[in-house]
């Protein structure tokens, strides 16, 4: 099967996987603003192995989202093997990613996410089990350090396996989502890993993203929290990469928020609108009376309510 990574124009700007956030509606918005690649929310391999219906629905996608990667998490190689086969056959994404980066305690306490990096033999078996059970390109989402295990050593241990790409979160497990990005480790990975390397962590604006790209020499960026309420960051990054300016008006922000909400309602009904509350609050964080408007948006249950609230925002900056 084609390795789509080889056909992506560089620098690559990807919407990184975020649990509870990177659903199909949000992925489509990010693609509309120029994201080159999007990932699913985190999908449990145990759920896929034993009771797959809900998780399969979670990771389904629209063809407009391609190239699209399903990210799996867990700690049991057999579960990963079964999940890889199921996702390949029934979802048919462009790739499968294995999560070695999630720092959330409810994930790490099961030995999954970032904790899986500390068990090198098990981590290797997990990666091997996925590669052997799918023709799709397999990639990893990793951290620069988890306890005593450093990323270069981890990648050396699994380096003979057919891993097509890694997204490197430039922080340790102990740092979680804050603190400085350890540039040097990502740069070292870029110099020694034979596949694609995406830098991740701290790309909260086009300026910071381009600084991270230049400093690491990576093939691209995995944007995560920098896209929350600002999916046009992908357009800004491409503008910066090509030497051109990119601005988004307040009117465009409101229209994006409305379009995102309408898509969420189409895909998930009332539940989609309730899940949109956090996105809506992120969208309006820099508009006048943001605090007052945020309180109203945090309680919406219908598209009519959303439209009525957003219509009160003045478009002029």
Image (cartoon, rainbow, N blue to C red):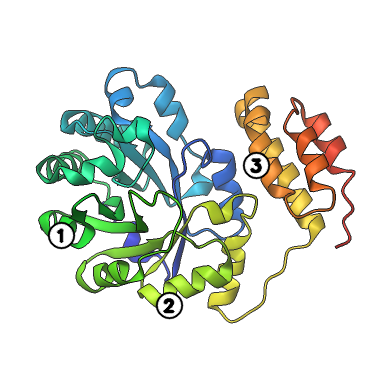
Between disc 3 and disc 2, whose residue precedes? Answer: 2
User: Which is more foreground, mark 2 or mark 1?
Assistant: 1
Residue assigned mark 1: 153
Which of the numbered marks, if any, corresponds to residue 233? Answer: none
Judging depth in this view, the residue of 2 and 221 nearest the camera is 221
- Which residue occupies 68% across, 71% down? 246
Residue 8 vertical placement versus 67 (above, below): below
Between disc 2 and disc 1, whose residue precedes? Answer: 1
User: Which is more foreground, mark 1 or mark 3?
Assistant: 1
| Residue 237 image position (x, y, % from top left) | 56, 69
Judging depth in this view, the residue of 3 and 269 nearest the camera is 269
- Which residue occupies 43% across, 72% down? 213
Question: How many numbered callouts?
Answer: 3
Between disc 1 and disc 3, whose residue precedes? Answer: 1
Which of the numbered marks, if any, corresponds to residue 279? Answer: 3
Q: Is residue 7 left or right of residue 112?
A: right
> Which quadrant would residue 239 be assigned to in this image?
bottom right
Residue assigned mark 2: 214
Q: Is residue 208 left or right of residue 194?
A: right
Within 10 Å of disc 1 (Cα), the crowding (few <14, some 14-19, many 20+) is few
> Which quadrant would residue 41 be assigned to in this image?
top left
Tag 1 secondary structure: helix
| Residue 84 image position (x, y, % from top left) | 26, 36
Within 10 Å of disc 2 (Cα), the crowding (few <14, some 14-19, many 20+) is few
Q: Is residue 182 left or right of residue 270?
A: left
| Residue 74 image position (x, y, % from top left) | 27, 33
Q: Does the residue at mark 2 contact the one at mark 1 (Cβ under 8 Å)?
A: no
Tag 2 secondary structure: helix
């Amino acid at each position: 099967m084609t390795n789509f990574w080889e056909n992506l124009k560089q620098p690559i700007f990807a919407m990184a996987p975020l649990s509870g956030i990177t659903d199909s509606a949000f992925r489509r918005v990010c693609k509309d603003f120029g994201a080159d690649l999007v990932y699913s929310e985190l999908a449990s391999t145990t759920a896929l192995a034993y009771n797959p219906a809900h998780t399969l629905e979670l990771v389904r996608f629209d063809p407009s989202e391609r190239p699209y990667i399903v990210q799996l998490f867990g700690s049991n190689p057999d579960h990963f093997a079964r999940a890889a086969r199921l996702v390949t056959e029934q979802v048919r994404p462009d790739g499968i990613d294995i999560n070695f980066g999630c720092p959330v305690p409810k994930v790490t306490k099961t030995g999954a996410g970032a904790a899986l990096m500390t068990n090198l033999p098990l981590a290797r078996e997990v990666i091997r089990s996925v590669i052997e059970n799918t023709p799709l390109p397999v990639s990893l989402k990793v951290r620069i350090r988890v306890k005593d295990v450093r990323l270069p050593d981890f990648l050396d241990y699994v380096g003979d396996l057919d891993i097509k790409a890694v997204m490197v979160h430039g922080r340790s497990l102990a740092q979680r989502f804050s603190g400085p990005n350890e540039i040097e480790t990502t740069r070292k990975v870029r110099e020694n890993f034979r596949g694609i390397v995406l830098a991740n962590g701290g790309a909260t604006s086009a300026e910071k993203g381009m600084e991270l790209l230049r400093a690491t020499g990576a093939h691209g960026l995995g944007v995560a929290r920098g896209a929350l309420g600002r999916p046009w960051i992908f357009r800004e990054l491409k503008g910066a990469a090509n030497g051109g300016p990119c601005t988004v008006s307040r009117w465009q922000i409101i229209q994006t928020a409305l379009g995102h909400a309408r898509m969420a309602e189409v895909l998930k009904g009332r539940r989609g609108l309730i899940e949109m509350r956090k996105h809506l609050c992120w969208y309006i964080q820099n508009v006048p009376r943001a605090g007052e408007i945020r309180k109203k948006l945090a309680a919406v249950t219908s598209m009519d309510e959303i439209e009525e609230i957003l219509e009160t925002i003045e478009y002029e900056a």
